[in-house]
Amino acid sequence: MTLKRKVLVTGGGGGIGAAIVKNLLKDGHNVAAADIDFSAFLDSHPSLIKLKLDLRNDLSCRGIINETIKVFGNIDTLINAAGVCYGGDPETADVNEWDETFNVNVRGMFRLTQLALPYLKKSPRADIINVSSIWGTDYNPNLLSYSSSKFAVEGYTGGLRNWAFTQNIRVTSLQVDKVDTGFRRNLGPKGDFPVEQLKKMLTPDDVSDAVCFVLNMPSTGCVSSMRLDAPLWYQNNED
């Protein structure tokens, strides 16, 4: 990333999003971190602005786009890292949790991106990275609403990519495996793992490094999709 970018990161208040924000700031870029809660992200930086965002609300989405433009003048990079996850299989999935999952993970991503596109189109090099999941290509009946939402994200990202190439915008789907964050807090006891298992997951910095790899690609190429697995998770160490 030789050019100083003007980046908007959703979910920037914690987990993967916060790791991405910190990495971008370290590399000298202007970053707008947007999230519904910043209680876990207390860092400050002269090139950072923090914006409260509720992806379920159109006015909130429009507001952070306007504020980012007001401060930075434009947006040339959008990283959609925000998301929610609930458990539940075809019999037990809660309809209200299903609605929230799709409102945040799919509709919110679509709407915020739609509002950012007029500004991204003005950039000589624009990128959109949608943080997806391996459960957007593989099936998971126990995370039914989440997996279904990520399949929708994959479909949306593919259609967006084919359209965006004609606008000089590169679009990437980053499909991540298990990551050691607080993302599983809505899963209750099923989201709790012993420390030895957490150490086998991806770290937020692993995902952030993948994001920076994508953004460092020369303009002649685009990483259309990248799957980031957690290989240690699948190793059997009982021998």
Image (spheres, helix red, strand yellow):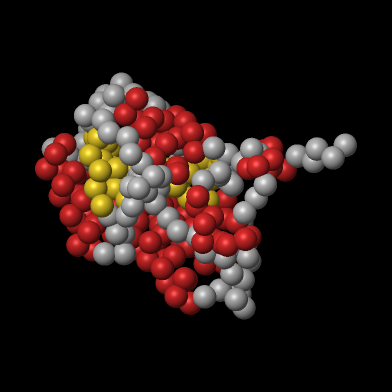
Q: Where is residue 197 in the image (x, y as percent from the top left)?
A: 68, 43
Viewer-closest of 218 and 131: 131
Asked if 187 appears above or below 49 in the picture, the reply is below
Residue 36 visible in the picture? yes
Quadrant of image for the N terminus: top left
Determine whether, in the image, residue 97 is placed left or right of residue 178.
left
Q: Residue 213 occupies which quadrant of the picture?
A: top left
Asked if 190 appears above or below 125 in the picture, the reply is below
Determine whether, in the image, residue 160 is placed left or right of residue 177.
left
Considering every residue shown, the one lying at the far top of the view is 2
Q: Position of residue 125 (x, y in %)?
A: 27, 33
Residue 163 visible in the picture? no
Which residue is rendered at x = 37% and y = 66% of the image? Answer: 103
Q: Residue 155 occupies which quadrant of the picture?
A: bottom left
Which residue is rendered at x = 31% and y = 21% of the image? Answer: 2
Q: Position of residue 132 (x, y in %)?
A: 48, 50
Which residue is rendered at x = 25% and y = 43% of the image? Answer: 50
Q: Position of residue 119 (x, y in %)?
A: 19, 44
Determine whether, in the image, residue 12 is placed left or right of residue 52.
right
Which residue is rendered at x = 34% and y = 24% of the image? Answer: 27
Q: Residue 6 occupies which quadrant of the picture?
A: top left
Considering every residue shown, the one lying at the far right of the view is 239
Quadrant of image for the C terminus: top right
Viewer-closest of 190 and 10: 190
Determine whether, in the image, residue 73 is placed left or right of residue 171.
left
Give the tally of numbered discs: 0
Viewer-closest of 206 and 2: 206
